[in-house]
Image (tube, helix red, strand yellow):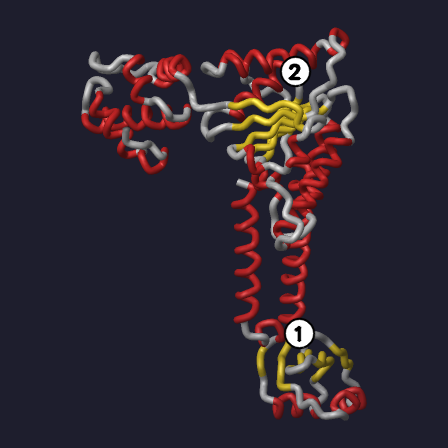
Amino acid sequence: MRRKSTIFFIIIALSLAFVLLILPEDLFLGEKIPYSQFVSMVEEGKVESVTIYEERVKVRSEGKTYSTSNPDYPTFKEEMLLSGINVEMGTSSLSSALDTVFNILFLAIVAFAIYKALDWYFHTFRCVRHTGVHFSDIAGMEEVKRDMALIVDSMKHKDRTAIRNVKGIILEGPPGNGKTLFAKALAEEAGLNFIATRGADFQGALMGMGAMKVKMLFKKARRKKPSIVFIDEFDSIGEKRNYAGSGIDKENNRIITTLLNEMDGFSDKGEVLVVAATNSFQSLDAALIRPGRFDLKYTVSNPDHNTRMELIAIYTKGRKLSDTLNPQLLSSLFEGLSAAAIETVLNESEAIRVQEGKDSIDGECIAKAALKCREKLNVRRK
């Protein structure tokens, strides 16, 4: 809504400027008369005052306003004064109006730019107090849940353990299996503020902007402590440094160096925890994943048989399956797929069922859905 109002204001201002440009100048200066008539009026003593503009002369005579051509010779003003006529120098009303419009436009653009800059500064990294996600909301992955529950316990009861506080956790594995959900659940279970971002948010056209954004992120995390900073697509900024590379590589080096400095500056109280998600752990810079920085790594892999059973129960809730299908069979059919891929196939199956007017999802619906989603999900024929 705010964006529409801004666009509407700009359109109105530009339309006004265009109208002023095409309007004749005489409309602002009065009725146009020949210069010879003006000379006659001067000789007859009927002219009270003149205002000299660049192209025209505004004439005030017997309570009326006229305009005529500016003769533009050196003694014109002197002759008018000697004739007892009040003389003023003026700028075109049209020019003044246009100057006013463009000044307003310029100020509006500057104000809008300042507003957007402040809005970007204060809202680039949004802090969420409650994510609303718990470990119980995540299907399967019991081993990862248990390990993270221990982290939650150590963060809640620091006085019970002498274990060094964890600074960073890396969640690695194929996309679409819930790495973001685990980060949200960890924040909710531990009672921490949650600040989420992506690696792409630190990449920009201006050199040095990425490092500045990293500093802004951790400054906000410390201000909102205790908190979790979640960086998705971490490999896009955490790849191994290339010191002989291009400008992009140098910018990536600055981002990594700044990130390392920020993490090394954490206090020992465990008030800020960094959780990073990546699909390519092998590509990360060694300095990032050494102990003392990202201390722990958990693999969120494609769901196993039991997890697929849970996911199928969740994604088919409220949908009717054919008697020829059962969760066991579907779990076998979906072997090797990510959680997101399973959800996509089942959603597409329901859409196909509706289109074909069937009472329930059958094997044909599943097969058509898998074929339709094959390229997107990279489903292999077995």
Give the x, y percent position of residue 250.
66, 50
For the residue pair 17 and 274, the one nearer the viewer reads as 274
* Label 2 Cα neighbours within 10 Å, binned few <14 / some 14-19 / many ≥20: some
Residue found at x 56% / y 11%: 146
Q: In which quarter of the image is the C terminus?
A: top left
Residue found at x 67% / y 68%: 96
Q: How far apart are marks 2 and 1 (CA)?
A: 67 Å
Give the x, y percent position of residue 33.
58, 84
- Tell me the tag on residue 191: 2
Q: Name the residue under label 1.
A: 92
The image quadrant that residue 304 belongs to is top left
For the residue pair 77 and 320, the one nearer the viewer reads as 320
> Of callouts 2 and 1, which one flags the residue occurring earlier in the amino acid sequence?
1
* Label 1 Cα neighbours within 10 Å, binned few <14 / some 14-19 / many ≥20: some
The image quadrant that residue 240 belongs to is top right
Q: Residue furthest top?
A: 160
Please determine whether, in this image, residue 153 is positioned above or below residue 118.
Answer: above
Amino acid under disc 1:
Ser
Give the x, y percent position of residue 183.
58, 23
The image quadrant that residue 162 belongs to is top right
Regarding residue 316, the answer to whether it shows in the image is: yes
Amino acid under disc 2:
Gly
Left or right: residue 289 versus residue 281 is: right
Left or right: residue 349 versus residue 116 is: left
For the residue pair 53 and 163, the one nearer the viewer reads as 163
